[in-house]
Image: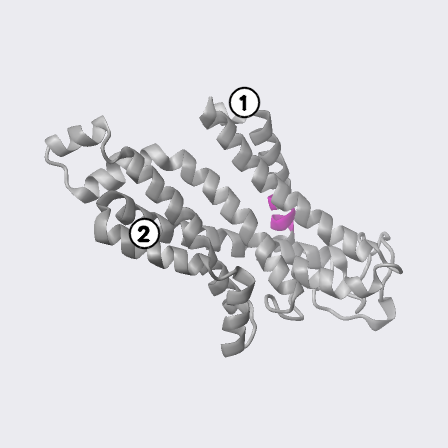
Amino acid sequence: MLKYFKNKTFLAGIILFGLILLFMTAGLIHTPFNPNEICPEGKLLAPSKTHLLGTDNLGRDVLSRIMAGTRISILLGFCVMIFGLVSGLILGSISGWFGGTADIIVMKLINTQMAFPGILLALMLTAVFQPNIKITFLSLCIMSIPRFARMTRACYIKYRNSLFVQAAKARGAGNFRIMYIHILPNIISELLVTATTSFSMAILSESGLSYLGLGVQPPHPSFGRMLNDAQHYIFTNPAGVLIPLSFLCLLVSGINLIGDGISQVNRK
């Protein structure tokens, strides 16, 4: 683990993401105001001692809403990443290790899913159900599977005829033991890089869906929801757009830097 902290890119990502996590944790303990409290007489206020980042078009404290929105984005992104990792690992390992019919069936399913853009999938689900955070979560989980499955499949194909696998077979090891005890530890670094990419993509996708009104619903805060509310006042209150956008960029940049750092260390 220490070798990663010696990488400047990884270290910069950890620091940046750590600051965002610290900011989010502070919001769990205390927020200056109720994130959803409407104050008509305090609309579109500039940053001040009372409201450090100003207020939005309904008089809600921007700092408090960003604290709450960060929590939603990170929690949703993390859950989507875990779902994609577990599901993709299972499907990819079966496909890559056994090959044949199993490989054909799994890859047909993966390729079929990839033919539907994420936004289109969300629109389809919204047409059947009411738009809410559960539909957003379901859409993003389905979108996250192919990335992990394809990467895992490629790694298992790479290692299934390697010497250490042949040695394990000679000792009588079963398929499950070889797949998840012998091969899996060798692809952890690739999984971590894919996980950071999936994490950041889930956060960006959630923000995009919320911006379109398909994700987090009012009055709950989200980066996309805040950008949607603030876009009508971009010339009179540009901070309403720039502040949540800056936090979103910092969050995603921190995660991507961690992934880039891991990738750089693994290539050495």
Indicate which disc residue 91 carries: 2
Q: Residue at x 72, y 53 (%)?
A: 244
Answer with the quarter of the image where residue 112 lies. Answer: bottom left
Residue 13 locus on image (x, y percent) = 59, 35
Residue 128 locus on image (x, y percent) = 49, 78
Q: Residue at x 31, y 34 (%)?
A: 158
Instruction: Tell me if residue 74 comes above or below residue 116 in the rendering.
Output: above
Would residue 129 be seen by someone viewing this image from the given angle? no
Q: Which residue is mark 1?
A: 6
How many residues crowd around disc 1 within 10 Å: few (fewer than 14), some, or many (20 or more)?
A: few
Q: How many numbered discs sit on the rendered protein?
A: 2
Callout 2 touching callout 1 (CB < 8 Å): no
Left or right of 196 on screen, residue 107: left
Q: Is residue 23 magenta?
A: yes
Residue type (three-letter) at the residue carrying disc 2:
Leu
Residue 151 locus on image (x, y percent) = 39, 43
User: Which span of residues is magenta-colored?
Assistant: 21-26
